[in-house]
Amino acid sequence: MVRILFILFIFSSSISYSQDSLKWYKSKSKVYYAPPVTTASIAAAGLLANYLGIKRLNNRASLNPDELLKLNINDVNSFDRNVFNYSVNDREDSHNFTDWGLYISVAIPFALFIDPAIREDWLEVSLMYLETQMIAVNIYNYLGPGIFRRYRPITYMHGEGNPPVEMDELTDNNNERSFFSGHTSNTACGTFFAAKVLTDYHPEWSTGAKVGVYVAAFIPPALVGYYRTRAYKHFYTDVITGCAVGALTGVFVPQLHKHLRSKKNKYGGATSFMPIMQPTMMGLYVKKTL
């Protein structure tokens, strides 16, 4: 798995930094440097990594019923323990709400194309958004439940509710993916990406207006995170972490492309990376053109 991810990283890096060698491979945006072939290639590598990550998580063994029966609510920290105050009977409705909240929020960035300036760069912005979401989901896959195995709140509720929670529902291996919340992360990634792009295309807006955009961007992940706890899918710390990961990813990736645009405008030229793989050696060839 590590070798696969390393090869994907080297492959995407070699494409990302050698685009100027292909004359048809250009970035037209004045705000971001995100050549379509580069950005699409990174997103494709992310899709493959996501497939492998999800497959690895799904192949885990089912949870042990005896271990689940030993779980005690009082062992949960006092902050997170408050999720057990919600009615377990409402978990299905809350879960459905979070699914719809996620779907709508992930689609929000496409509303940016109502703006004529952003619409001109629709291809680059769309691919950049796909790239951003792929980074977010792979952070979840490999640095979330890929490392941390935390039981969801529902696993503590065996026999509770009306009808009572059955053990068959609890032994699904998905129930050890509490940390962190993928729903909240992807929701925040979508809304904060939209906020970042909108404010980058409108630097003339006042500070108050920009702050208002980001406050609005926080509302959907806050709602999704809240109802993820009511659905007994996550603890508070899970959704807070998920919101932070998604928001930072949604802002950082466009900022990186913005930095690359300003750097290219200032210095021009390009840096090319080419992987070197031989039976006895592995390395990276670097070439700078002015």
Image (cartoon, rainbow, N blue to C red):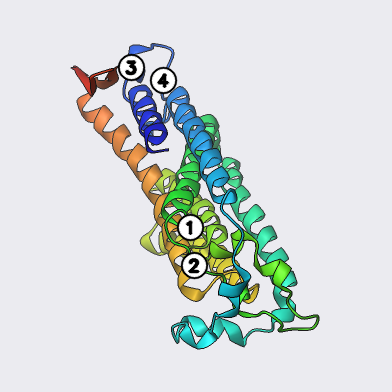
Relative placement, left or right, of 162 versus 288 is right
Amino acid type shown at disc 2: Arg
Residue 84 rendering spot, x and y as whole percentages? 59, 84
Q: Secondary structure at mark 1?
A: loop
Q: What label does residue 20 carry, if any? A: 3
Q: Earlier in the sequence, mark 3 or mark 1?
A: 3
| Within-10-Å neighbours for mark 2: few <14, some 14–19, many 20+ | some
Determine which residue is flagged by label 2: 150
Q: Tag 1: residue type?
A: Pro
Q: Which residue is mark 1?
A: 145
Q: Are marks 1 and 4 in contact (CB under 8 Å)?
A: no
Q: Can residue 125 be seen in this snapshot?
A: no
Which numbered disc, 1 or 4, marks the residue that appears first in the sequence? 4
Q: Nearer the viewer, mark 3 or mark 4?
A: 3
List the single residue furthest toward the right: 163
Give the residue at mark 4: 26
